[in-house]
Amino acid sequence: MSAAETASGQDLIYGGRFDAAHLFFTHLALSFPRDPVGPALAASALIWQGAAIPDDQFMADSVDTLLAEAAARAQKGVSEATTDSARVVQLFWLGTALGYRARQADLHGHPWRASQEARAMRAALERALALDSTCVDCQLGLAVYDYALARASAIARLVARILGLGGGDAELALARMRRVQESGTLTRYEARWLYANALVRESGSDTLLKLEARRLVGDLADRFPDNPVFSRFLESNPAPQ
């Protein structure tokens, strides 16, 4: 699957054309049966559609099936890769699928499974970075991991300690998100969206952080005006007076 095809499908997702994006990546998943990109981003399209409705349970079984297929393809790709560059690509998509699976498990009230998926995601992405330290996109999943642990509930922190996941580092996570939203390729828009949400959470009474979050999502809304997720964020987070 070409980078141009991946980018075109991602533009459909961020542009709010979720059904079209899902069909696009489903077709690519069938056309490239060894490639994890198709099922991973078909799942992403459904996740974004659920966020737009909003409905956390939207097509949950289909999302789980797609992510399982993406993870299996990527894991096989890692074991069959003959070069480090090919291995890094497969590890990135393995981390992506596992990260989405962690998100889904957490969203649906399964903290143990979420923690296990997150730990596996971290291992895949750290292995990718060990092979290629320039993989900026690989840093987004690690940033989300660190931020989630740093800002987790008491129960989630307990689970993390039991599983040996660490305590997280919010400052490092924010720095990584900032870098990816500035310099990433596959994950730039995703990173910008996640970074803006983290800034709002961190802002408290800091109007500068709130304004920066609005600027970031405002840029996304200008580029993708038909995505209701971005417009809802701006409505829910009015500019400080």
Image (tube, rainbow, N blue to C red):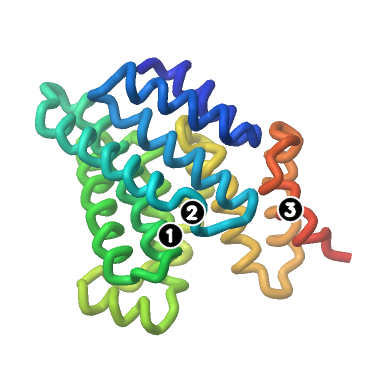
Q: Could you say which quadrant of the image residue 199 lies in?
A: bottom right
Q: Which residue is mark 3?
A: 232
Q: Could you say which quadrant of the image residue 112 lies in?
A: bottom left
Which numbered dot is residue 17?
Answer: none
Q: Is residue 106 left or right of residue 21?
A: left
Residue 61 lies, with reference to residue 35, above or below; the image says: below
Q: Quadrant of the C terminus?
A: bottom right
Disc number lying in front (3 or 1): 3
The kind of residue tagged 3 is Arg
* SS at circle 1: helix
* SS at circle 3: helix
Q: Mark 2 Cα within 10 Å, few/some/many (few <14, many 20+)?
A: few
User: What whole-number distance in Å separates the C-alpha atoms at marks 3 and 1?
Assistant: 28 Å
Circles 1 and 2, Cβ within 8 Å, touching? The answer is yes
Q: Residue furthest right?
A: 241
Of marks 2 and 3, which one's residue comes earlier in the chain? 2
The kind of residue tagged 2 is Ala
Residue displayed at 15% across by 33% down: 76
Q: Which residue is mark 2?
A: 175
- In percent of width and height, residue 49 lies at 57, 44
Q: Mark 3 Cα within 10 Å, few/some/many (few <14, many 20+)?
A: few
The kind of residue tagged 1 is Leu
Q: Mark 1 Cα within 10 Å, few/some/many (few <14, many 20+)?
A: some
Q: Could you say which quadrant of the image residue 90 lies in?
A: top left
Circles 3 and 1, Cβ within 8 Å, touching? The answer is no
Q: Is residue 102 left or right of residue 182?
A: left
- In percent of width and height, residue 239 lies at 83, 59
* SS at circle 2: helix
Nearest the viewer among 190 and 24 is 24
